Amino acid sequence: MGGPSFGNAAWQPPDHRPSDAERDDAIEQLAAGAEAGRLSSDTFSHRIDQALAVRSHNELTQLVSDLPIPPPRPGLGQRMVNAVAAVAHFRFRVKAAWRGPSLPRLSLPGNAQSTLRIGRMPECDLQLFDTTVSRYHAEFRRSHTGWFLVDLGSTNGTRVNGWRITAPTAVHPGDEVSFGSVVFSLNGH
């Protein structure tokens, strides 16, 4: 047996007024439809006006009913992770920009040399006298596509733009590279 009925129609809860968030979602869906070419600019403009003026959730739903359903928005947890990552990246870029001019420059060889070994040992191509640098710390390796930096199992790690590397990583002019606590900015090569 269903809910209360009045005559031939089943009872339905009253339609509610859409929230600002629901209006924003509908406007985003309309914008995506316009970008995809599913709405003309006149139709898009008209529907935006309607989305701002509707008084019920059903009216708002009708405005986007002919558009594909958008993918679900990331949950609060994922949005928090994305926000923290963006702030961390921004902080790194500000810190790098602040320190950038004072960092020593490192130029990679322009000749036919295909590797450049970094470490504390005298046979290294770039010998660094710092206790945070391993005896054989890292290598720059040239390939046909450019230079890559490879950590050689160092104790204190090798970083490119603040990120510790665990596999061969492409490097470019302007990148910040660090071997232990010794930091350089790469010059053009």
Image (cartoon, rainbow, N blue to C red):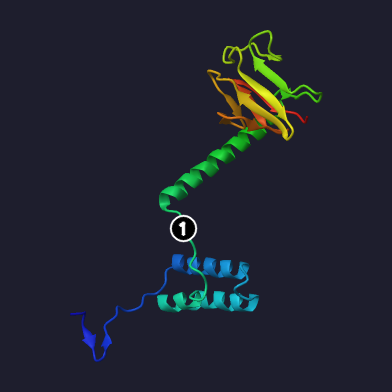
Element type at mark 1: loop
Residue most extreme to the top = 122
Q: Quadrant of the C terminus?
A: top right
Q: Residue at x 66, y 29 (%)?
A: 176
Foreground residue among 165 and 131: 165
Give amino acid for label 1: Arg
* Residue 6 picture location, percent across and down: 24, 89
Q: Is residue 56 visible?
A: no
Pointer 1 residue: 73
As drawn, which residue projects farthest toward the front? 144
Q: Is residue 185 above or below residue 84?
A: above
Mark 1 neighbour density, 10 Å: few (under 14) some (14–19) many (20 or more): few
For the view shown, which residue lies furthest in the bottom direction? Answer: 7
Query: Relative to 76, is 144 on the left or the right?
Result: right
Quadrant showing the N terminus? bottom left
Q: Which image quarter: residue 88?
A: top right
Number of numbered discs visible in the structure rendering:
1
Residue in the picture at 54% in, 44% down? 86
**Picture quadrant where residue 122 is located:** top right
Along the line of sight, which residue is nearer the eye, 91 or 137?
Answer: 137
As displayed, is residue 64 above or below residue 167? below
> Where is residue 21 drawn, in percent x and y?
45, 65
Residue 97 in the figure: left or right of residue 30: right
Residue at 71 percent across and 34 percent down: it is: 172
Question: Would you say residue 112 is visible in this rendering?
Answer: yes
**In the displayed image of the protein, which residue is found farthest to the left?**
1
